[in-house]
Amino acid sequence: MIIRRKTKKLKILLISSILITTIMSCNNEKVIDAKDISVSGTMEAELTAPPNVPKPIGDRKAKKLLVNMEILEQEGTMTDGTTYMYWTFGGTVPGSFIRTRIGDEVEFTLSNHPDNKLPHNIDLHAVTGPGGGATSSFVAPGHEKTFSFKTLNPGLYVYHCATAPVGMHIANGMYGLILVEPEGGLPKVDKEYYIMQGDFYTKGVNGEPGLQAFDMKKAVDENADYVVFNGKVGALTGDNAITANVGETVRLYVGNGGPNLTSSFHVIGEIFDNVHIEGGSLLNKNVQTTSIPAGGAAIVDFKVDVPGTLILVDHAIFRAFNKGALGMLKVKGNEEKQLYSGVMQEGIYNPEGATLQEMPDDGKETVVVQTGEKSLAEKIASGKSLYNKTCFACHQANGEGIPNAFPPLANSDYLNADVKRAISIIVNGKSGEIEVNGKTYNSVMTKQTLTDTEVADVLTYVYNTWGNNKTNVKVSTVQEVKSQH
Ligand code: HEC
Ligand SMILES: [Cu+2]
């Protein structure tokens, strides 16, 4: 009896599961195994800077696709009067947009510019494989690495640097989007744009002028000073606004690099006709606000029916009006009184936040270029500026370092014990185990390409700051250390 009843239950289970799978596969698009798609021919991928995207794939056959991406560490504008040392894929935040189709064999070459200070790598969420490519792409300044992968799943995917400290590399702008189009491509639209949100953590408060250092504590606390689209305040406002004409369909590829915050992405004055939720294949329709997690994306499209300026925001609204997460889509064309009768004008949502007000354009430090021995004060001034350009990325603005990764220069017993050793570390680099203030570090500092004067200045600054022993490092001592090698 018992046995028979069990078989009956099993049968019902079997039948219903067959039914469910049939229903599900009927709902699915064509079931093709991407592994079986063969490639024919080779082509170089078109890479674009935001807010632009490469041309649609359409019905192109799967190919071997060559992607050449260059990592650049460079100072850029965060907001008027405030700059930041961005680490970038391709010179922009977010990094270059990569457009592929399902079944492509992507041959990815990552080059790390020789002027860069740090090793980096790339983890592409579109990759099936360990670390999303991270382990195969780890590359030191002045080197390049090539690895390849096949795109197995259609969708919009985030890529990012995954080098320790990972959060810091992402917080400095190392993220972007890679699109894998389905067989036959995406439905045609009139305009396509690339937007990515990111949160930034700076030593100074929002709007404080000058070059701002990364603030590890604020990052850990998730207390962002800037939340922006496309790497800076105003990347998509005023003359930088994206555009469309009345009657056109607009598709936005929206990503969120984080590192911390989830985006409540919303376009004021529009409703998304279609949303590819989380960048995947599931379509939602008639959506007001879509949630985009850190390390996630969404594809939204809508038809613009009336002229005016649509405002793109993170609807966690203080971020939009006080931290920078605000962009504009300007729609040109004739008014459609039937659809919208009101008076539309720019500045309806008159931004109230500090990030959108004019900032005094002062406070920028100037580098003193001079040869020969300078006065102590001159050396400290020039050394400070050099420090903030060269060393602070790792040792931090106040010289406190980062636990387990970068040793402190503040009050450093290791530094104070031996000037010539400190000079040698800057000139020749340093790897292997060292002990600083009772803590062990075992990492790599790349050699810094500085002139003798610059080495003397930056070390003099470090020695005369944060409780160190006030050594005045002479240019001649630097030369002496150099000649010993
Ligand atoms: C790429 C990140 C990086 C940059 C940029 C960098 N350092 Fe370092 N630095 C390190 C690491 C990592 C170590 C520890 C090396 C080890 O473990 O052997 C170190 C060690 C040191 C030390 C010895 C340890 C201590 O804390 O006293 C000094 C001094 C130093 N760096 C000074 C500088 C100065 C000055 C600059 C700018 C000119 C600079 N570094 C730029 C990563 C960096
Ligand atoms: Cu990196």
Image (tube, helix red, strand yellow):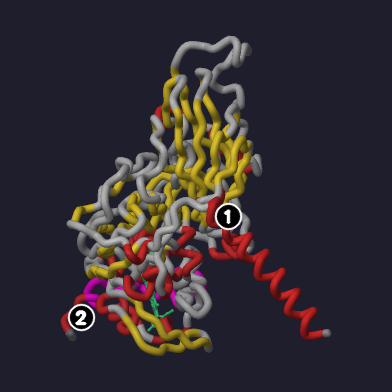
Query: For this view, does 26 lie left or right of residue 139?
Result: right
Q: Is residue 417 left or right of residue 70?
A: right
Q: Amino acid at mark 2?
A: Glu
Q: Label 1 neighbourhood size at 10 Å, few (<14), some (14-19), many (20+)?
A: some
- Identify residue for label 2: 480
Where is mark 1, residue-wise?
Answer: 293
Quadrant of res 312:
top right
Amino acid type indicated by mark 1: Pro
Magenta region: 464-478
Q: Quick one: quadrant of the C terminus?
A: bottom left
The mark lying in front, picked from 1 and 2, is 1
Q: Position of residue 260 (x, y in %)?
A: 58, 58
Q: Position of residue 291 (x, y in %)?
A: 61, 48
> Would you say residue 258 is visible in this rendering?
no
The image shows residue 162, relative to residue 157, as above or below, that is below
Picture residue at 61% right of the left edge, 64% below the top = 18
Residue 165, given in percent of the width and then of the height, sits at 47, 71
Of residue 116 and residue 336, the one placed in the foreground of this image is: 336
